[in-house]
Image: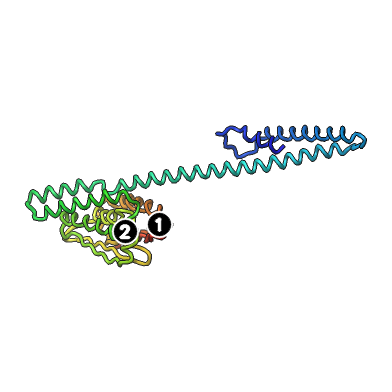
Amino acid sequence: MWYFNIYMLSRKNGNERKQTISYTNLIRSLLFGLVVMLGLSCIQQLILANINFGPTMLMVEVRGILINLVFFMFLNLLQKNYENQYVNMELERIRNDNLGAQYELLKQQVNPHFLFNSLSTLKSMVETNDKESVNFIIKLSNFYRYTLESRKLDLIRVHKEIEILNAYLFLQKARFGDGFTFTNTLAKESLNTLIPPFTLQLLVENCIKHNIVSLDRPLHIKVYEEGDCIVVENQMQLKLGENNSLGVGLKNIDLRYSHFVDKPVNIVNDQKVFKIKLPLIYELHYH
């Protein structure tokens, strides 16, 4: 009866993923149990013909039904447990594939308009015979070298990210002059932690893109540590029409961080100062 139930389960369509018991198979299994127990009892009667069993035959049949019912339920429980594990594994695989593809897309979204702005600035510098044109070209070359190297990685050291940021800031200084200031007070311990590539650069880019940057109203950007977080801070002096455009880059960063830590990226906005708090990612946690 045990092997008959296994045979019936194996006949199920491989694509069928029902979460209910097959009553057709249950009836077949019970009928098979009745036939088996009836056959065994007949053999017993033939062997022991001199003994009158009487109503015991009914008990034999009931026992057959109960035994086969237990077999059937137990095997179905094993089958459903296996199917659930298989479905969960497939869902997890699809989820990981989706997150991996999403993360790759997020990495490709970094700095989409930066090259155009940089080339426009370089054109202006060349036309005015600016002596910093050569340095600008070198910094632009270094920045895109960092870009090519870092996009292959999921995480880099914070001090490497600062190098990328410094190259970016040099290029922006050529464009805005003293229209903004940048202060970095990160300690050595924080510089040795990990960060998704271009996170700080993207945050500073957002600061410059969404706020007024001018000699009359210079934008002050700070990067420092606070507890177990790296904080990027700037005063609020939004351009007109920028109130609804602050979320895209931040969602990008929050999604990237969700791949590595359970802590969220916190946003503090009191309408005077805007802060982004990035959880520190230690190498031990990443592994």
Q: Residue at x 34, y 47 (%)?
A: 106
Q: Residue at x 47, y 44 (%)?
A: 93
Instruction: Assign a secondary structure to mark 1.
Output: helix
Q: Is residue 111 left or right of residue 130?
A: right
Q: Is residue 4 above or below residue 164?
A: above
Residue displayed at 70% across by 41% down: 71
The image shows residue 105, relative to residue 198, as above or below, that is above
Mark number, residue 286: 1
Label 2 residue SS: strand
* In the image, farthest residue toward the left: 129
Q: Which mark sits nearer the N-terminus, 1 or 2?
A: 2
Q: Measure the C-alpha gap from mark 1 to mark 2.
A: 12 Å
| Observer-nearest of 252 and 153 | 153
Disc 1 crowd rating (10 Å Cα; few below 14, some 14-19, many 20+) is: few
Q: In the rendered structure, which amino acid carries the disc numbered 2?
A: Arg
The label shown at residue 157 is: 2
At x 83% / y 35%, what residue is drawn? 41
Please state which amino acid type lies under the numbered disc 1. Tyr
